[in-house]
Amino acid sequence: MATKKSLRILILLAVVLVIAAVVIVSQMSRTKSEIVIGVVGARTGDNAALGEKQANGAKLAVEEINANGGVRGTELVLALEDSQGLPAQAVACLDKLIYRENVLAVIGDCQSSPTLAMLPVIAKAEIPLLAHGTSLSITQQNNPWVFRTRANDVVKFSSLVGFLVGEMNYSKIAVFHDSADYGIGGADAIIGGLAERSMDVVANESWTPGDKDFSSQLINIRNTKPDVVIFIGPMVDMGLAMKQARQIGIEAQFAGGAGIESETTVGAAAGAAEGLIFAAGFISSNPDSKVQSFVSSFEEHFGYKPDDFAATGYDSIYLLAAAIEEAGTDPADIRDALANLEYQGVEGTFDFDSVGEGLHTMAYGKVANGVPTYFDPNNQ
Amino acid sequence: MIIQLIISGLAIGSVYSLVALAHSLIWSGVRAVNFAQGEVFMAAAFVALTALSGAGRLPALPFGAAVLVGVVAASLIGLVIYNVAIRTTSKKGFLYALGACIGFSTLLQSSAILIWGSTGEQFPAQISMVPLRVGSIFIAPQDLFIMGISLTAMIILYFFLSKTRLGTAMRAAAQNREVAGLMGISHRLTDSLTFMVASCLAGLAGILLAPKFFVTPQMGSMISSKGFTAAVLGGFGSIPGAVLGGLLLGVLENISAGLISSSYKDAISFLIMVLIIMFKPEGLLGVKGGRKA
Amino acid sequence: MKARHHENFITHVLPFILIGVIALVPLLTRDPYLMHILVLGGIYVILAIGMNIITGYCGQINLGMAGFFAVGAYTSALLTTRLSLSFWLALPISALVAGVAGVLVGVPALKVRGGVYLVLITTSFAGIVQVILNQWVSLTKGPMGIVGIPAPAIGNVLIYERIHWFYLTYAIVAVIVFLAIRLVGSRIGRSFVALRESETSAQSIGISPAFYKVLAFVCSAVLAGIAGSIYAHYMTTISPDAFGFNLSVLALIMIVVGGIGSIPGSIVGGVALALFPEWLRALGPYQSVAYAAGIILAVVFLPKGLLMMGVDAVQLIRKWFLAPDETSEKEVS
């Protein structure tokens, strides 16, 4: 019967295709003679800028380490994957890194929701993850394999509030944030920090990430006549918001957390970022020699100054290198080494606590002549 | 305060209008939608920026020349999109054109990331951004300039389409292919031309708006969808409608954000839009019972 | 006669062959990476079938599938995390809630004519859903998302391993495929197609456009809701940014690439779009560009979709390798 014949051919074709697909996707894994570290981040899509800086920071670190003889005499290799900032894709990246590239550890994702999606996978695979997302919930999942190598939102913004109110004596604070987890988490931390001082924000407005026009919200803010406006959100958005704020007649002091002092934000603000105060672990004009050599090296390699995301990528690799150097190439040993490590990076001193938080204090800076500088209130 | 909201709404609305004009032009001429319009806009801005600052062995060009290069690049991209995505799928249905255009939008954005990186660059401002102050109302000269450009573009396009032979031929070809063909109008020619002109417009908009927005590979996507919405709102295919739709969208967004809630601003705008489409589907200036989309 | 057998085969038998072949994969390898991609593929298949019902069979373009998917995912997540309901209860309830959302979109959609306007209404709906998910923090935790969504349980076994998820997902896919085939072949399905071809003619033979169009929306919403629920429990964490416009676009691409108006096409499209970007990872930074180029080529050069391309290829092979009398028999059809 003709139908039987076509059935057979069809099954044959389907099976051939499936086998081919399986073979292609189950490529031969990397050999174990290299030390491979995975890097997950958005390389395309709306948040590609974050992933690019993260990757560049990491690449620089790897180059420097390899130039100095590598780790335990072996070269470090980076395996970069594009998560597009999407949770399901981040898991796919992680899977590929763990099951194909045989990574010893992974750094990333730059954003919180892909990081959260990766947590169950690393717990099961028992591979350390150096997380770059800042949402508090990342370290609240009872996951011993996650280590955060950036200051979380609460540390960053409550420190900022403490600085603005305590040291700079501002009292009328407005917060303008995006509606993503960074913005909302940050705003909550600010409101919490103010509540501790029995204060409240005078204005609390939000925007959708990617928005280009902030006039209505800024008008609302302007009406409350704040001393300080704190911006929290994607770099380009914050820059445009600051620019439009000045254009609409807001004269308040601007402030924010790490990211707001980056070249992207300051560039987008086109002059409106001048005088802005920020809280960050990494400040590019920090006179510390390690920081300075990082900054000049980075600028030489990539043509622009590094920012907080680049610093996180850089420090994360060095942290892993230190842990591997000490404990060897077993992921469980690396995890233990990280937990006990105390390391001075360009972002500050890392000392991981029991839930995996690495950075506990912030430094403060001011944008002067378009460049982030150290801020000492007693000297300004 | 309401006046400030309205003025600022008109300012951003003019931006939407420029992109909406490109959409409406393509619809009037080709009965198609270029869903990659925002990326054309972005590409023009990047190309012009590169021309302005010089690249590799190529010298930096003066502003006018850089704009020209950017606009030409935009029209070429538009031509490619037309030939690959629109013409080939015209007989197969709207879905295919949609899919192909969206493919192009990803292609353009990812290519821009590969070529120029994701960090973005500031386009040097040609017009002052220091705000003018009239009483308690602030407005930047840059915004006034953009409003002026949209209105000028609208007037020019309107006359082009209704008064010139080429423009009329384009409209005729859009409304009835066969008859236009019989009359010797090559619809391939008019379609390509329409696409190129619309892309030039989008490209010009991109370059003029670049100083306002900071040039990144992602700058096109939000603007594109708002521009599309504005075009439908004003009456898809109507040139004055595109401008009106853009201004209206800008003002509506601002008023709802300022008076109701900024967190739900987008949802409110969507809702208003849905209501307008439901109860006046041809848009504000469209013709009732017009051509099926 | 032959043509009808051929068509019957494609519509009724082929889908199960495809599912069967996929189900055999774990016999070759249990690689967790591949399992993840295939689970995602299964979720996509359900989404694609839903998309095909509204857009492929009924001809109403729907670019808001991400909204229905999100409603299903969040309903399921909230029911299991806040009310401690079991997955098996949460799944149908999520499907129902998504179905209600389908009515909320379908009814306004009746008032508009034309693809362009439908695009706008459906994307607006998905946009409104995303804003609400982000802003209604007390219910949805906003952008922080919901974490720790529990695994489904069958008796005492928790569905936690990738391989178990694989089988669970494809079991649900098989059931849905079966129901979808029945739907499409029934009077309802034929009414959908009639409406797509010519609304006025359909009306003249007594098919109420309003009823069937809304029904098609509801069907697609229910399926997207089921897909969303599976997704939420599989990923164990969800947040609004996973449910953006890109997902709705993906649903569209799935059916265009797989085969519009075809159940087996939905299967091919869903799995292909989960696999394809992973194949391209080897290209490193060129992954996204290659993906986009691939989509454009597929859309432009494979108007009948991958499935029909496969079927045509089989026909061609038969023509070349089989006896002449077979070939001439085929000519008749």
Image (cartoon, rainbow, N blue to C red):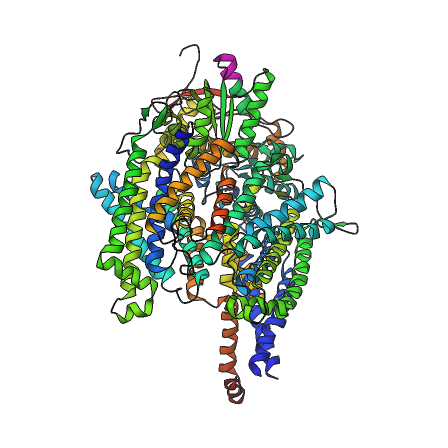
Q: Is residue B141 above or below residue B56?
A: above
Q: Does A50 sit left or right of C100 as displayed?
A: left
Which residue sits furthest right?
C155
Residue at (34%, 63%) from the top-left corner?
B175
Q: How many numbered marks have been drawn onto this rendered protein structure?
A: 0
Q: Is residue C260 above or below residue A278?
A: below
Q: In this rendering, is residue C252 above or below C8?
A: above
Is C182 colored magenta in this rendering? Answer: no
Q: Nearer the viewer, residue B59 or C205?
A: C205
Q: Main secondary structure of the magenta part?
A: helix
- Percent of width and height locating residue B141: 29, 31
Kindly identify the residue that appears in the image at 50 percent across and 47 percent down.
B275
Q: Nearer the viewer, residue A201 or A133?
A: A201
Residue A298 versus residue C146: which sits nearer the camera?
C146
Q: Is residue B233 left or right of residue B55?
A: right
Where residue A361 appears, as percent x and y from the top left, is 54, 21
Outermost residue, front side: B288
Q: Nearer the viewer, residue B180 or B51?
A: B180
Please say whether residue C160 is visible from this viewpoint: yes
Residue under the image location 50 percent in, 49 percent down:
C123
Quadrant location of residue B115?
top left
Tell me if residue A65 can be seen: no
Magenta-colored stretch includes residue A163 = yes
Please provide percent x and percent y for residue A202: 51, 21
Decide: is B71 above or below A192: below
Q: Residue furthest bottom?
A: C325
- Quarter of the view holding residue A367: top left
Q: Tell me residue B131's x, y (percent).
A: 32, 26
Q: Is residue A110 left or right of residue C90?
A: left
Look at the image and give the residue range highlighted in magenta.
A162-170
